[in-house]
Amino acid sequence: MKVGTWLAALGVVFAGLGCGGSDGVNGAQGGQGLQGPQGAAGPQGVAGPQGVAGPQGPIGPVGPSWQVGTGLELKDDVLSLRYGDEATAPVPSSDPRLTDARQPLPGSTNYIQNGVLAQDASFSLSGTGTTRGRMTTRSDLLVDAATAIATPTSLLKLQNTTSDGVSWTAFPLFTVDSAGGLLVRGEQGQGKLPMTGKGARLMWAPHKGAFRAGNADTQWDESGVGLFSWAGGTLSTASGRASFAMGESCIASGETSTCLGKSSSANGASSVALGLSNSSSGLGAFSGGLLNVAFGQGAVALGSGVTANADYSIALGQAASTNGYTGSFIWGDQSTVAVINNTAKNQFMVRAAGGIRLRVTADASAGCDLAPGGGDFTCTSDRNQKEGFRNVDGEQLLAKVSELPISTWRYKQEQSDVRHLGPMAQDFRAAFGLGADDTSIGMLDIGGVNLAAIKALEVRTRELREKTAEVDTLKAELAELKRGLSRLEAAVHAQAARP
């Protein structure tokens, strides 16, 4: 290889040829001139003195000029590496400094070497960098940023570029921004659960859009993880689509179902189970409390030990059951552990050994009560709760009562053998102007009319008794007059009969 090629390959700077440039150094001295022709051979004698040197030959052309790069040397037209200890000097492959890279910096006892063994050292970098292999730390990893949060920027980003089942280009899998925002992404149907089997975990499964936090045995394996579901606590299962389970051994297997508590289950679609050992089966069923069962569409069971086991039935309180009757309602108090049951469809039943109080004012000052152990309602009639008092003319009221149509009848929804006796609300309203409308009769109103009529009749009766007494007196007086007249007549006749 020519010297020029060596110089170009090794970073030598070519300065240019001598011709046309500045004068180069003198060329090497020319060779000795030709010796003159040898004389005729004579007798050999003593060697004569050396002959005079011939004339100097012409000066040769100026050779090329070269600039030798750092770490190289040119000697006798030979370019070679110049080994040494200088900072820019190359070293041979056998130089120990290639394996013992450098001495520690002043003030430090350690330095980083190439290799695979862990080293006790520190480093600080500025700018950007790329690693094509794994980077491992056995301590903390700190991102110490000073970045605005008004327009957050990413501080930590994990991304993936792949065509394995998807087409991702720098797809952001995990991002933490300068405002504390956290984003974890994925694609539905792509991937699998990060962990299965027994153990505690915080797990996001993007292929199902599902989240888990807590502890599980096999509850959080593929079969127990519903699409878009959420489960937390310990041993809880959310296997229904968009279901939610939180607590201990809580199961939400229905689509969009919710289970909160312990040992409860929400099996119906959109059903809810809250508390301890409750069960909700049926569309929209709801149970809450302790040991309750809501079985049926729209069934509700709240309390302790109550069962709503028919569509649209409601059981509340304690030890009560709708007994399979659709649309029924039952309330059970805590007076006994015996279960109270509905006896018909669409029935409203209440067990309240402490009585029932119904109030129709905000301050609970007016209403009706059903006393404990009793069978009749007592309603508010306190003078202090009334106003607008008017006296009643008993005779006029009796006249209206006498004209009020009274008949027997039954309600249209009742059985044919049921009969009632009384006036029509329209006639009652027209006659007395009482009540809130002309389609109902208040018990207080009809009771008041009856009492007023009785009172008027009592006045009539008293007046009748008084007149009767007067008549009796007159009768007695008349009888006495008759007796006196009879005696007088007898005396007259006797006087007339004497001679």
Image (tube, rainbow, N blue to C red):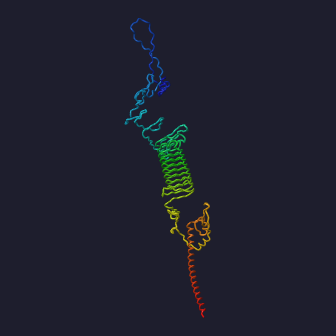
Instruction: From the viewer's perspective, tell me whether residue 16 is left or right of residue 413.
Output: left
Q: For the point 38% across and 32% down, which residue is it?
A: 103
Query: How many numbered callouts?
Result: 0
Q: Residue furthest front?
A: 499
- Horizontal side of 453 relative to 90 (left or right) equals right
In the image as oriented, which residue stretches furthest toward the bottom?
Answer: 499
Residue 28 coordinates in the image, percent (x, y):
44, 20
Work out whether residue 15 can be spotted: no
Front-lying residue, 212 or 318: 318
Q: Nearer the viewer, residue 413 or 475?
A: 475
Q: Is residue 190 above or below residue 5?
A: below
Please tell me whether residue 293 is drawn above or below residue 222 in the rendered image.
below
Who's the residue at 58% across and 83% down the image? 479
Q: Percent from the top left, x then y, of residue 93?
A: 43, 27
Looking at the image, is 56 positioned above or below residue 298?
above
x and y percent of residue 250 in the render? Answer: 49, 47
